Image (spheres, grey):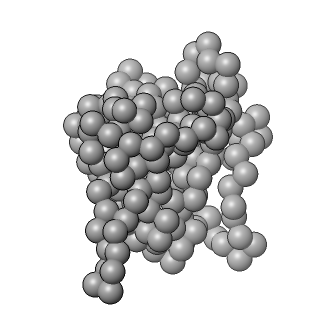
Amino acid sequence: MAAGDSVKHGNFTFTETSIEGVLVVDVKAYGDERGYFAETYKRPDFVAGGIDAEFVQDNQSSSTKGVLRGLHFQIEHPQSKLVRVVSGEVFDVAVDLRPGSATYGAWEGVVLSAKNRRQFFVPRGFAHGFLVLSDVAEFCYKCDDVYHPNDEGGLAWDDPEIGVAWPIAQDMELVLSDKDKVHPGLSGLA
């Protein structure tokens, strides 16, 4: 697939982004007056759609408006992630850190929300982060390796070399962890 190309498998539509391997997954929902039902993951459909990760850990976080988490990665134990939002809205970002990649240092971002039920697949070798756009957001993600706390890496969220266009509203107060305030830029990773 090329950027913008889509393929449908089951209740999922997989769309290639401008960075090879980074996919947007749209989920079909079935609704009526009672609400809706949607599959969020079905391995055979995901494999057919280009995502062959064996997920071994699920995580969930809750954050308030203006919280920016990231950009994070695991150094020796990289993880693929399938991310989604079950309440609220975030701007989710993946930055290519794969050595030798034609898109090294490039980023891709997408709005994920409970309303659009969209998912974002971030392959191994990427830094990942998100900014909460709603008052509160519940963020869920699957990983294909367990978290190793002594293997954390980080990249400056505001590195001008990368130039992520975070949708920071004028009245938004950013909230970052102490660690996220001091990560190096892309040139500091080498």
Based on the displayed image, in which of its 4 quarters is residue 184 positioned?
top right
Q: Is residue 68 left or right of residue 121?
A: right
Q: Is residue 114 left or right of residue 58?
A: right
Rendering coords of residue 83 (x, y %): 41, 50
- Vertical arrangement, residue 125 with respect to residue 68, above or below: above
Most extreme residue toward the top, as rendered? 100
Q: Which residue is drawn at 62% across and 64% down?
A: 174
- The reply to whether residue 26 is visible in this rendering is yes
- The reply to whether residue 149 is visible in this rendering is no
Based on the displayed image, in which of its 4 quarters is residue 137 positioned?
bottom left
Rendering coords of residue 25 (x, y %): 46, 48
Q: Quadrant of the N terminus?
A: top right
Q: In which quarter of the image is the C terminus?
A: top right
Q: Which residue is drawn at 34% across and 75% down?
A: 31
Q: Which residue is drawn at 32% across and 54% down?
A: 40
- Vertical arrangement, residue 78 with respect to residue 94, above or below: above
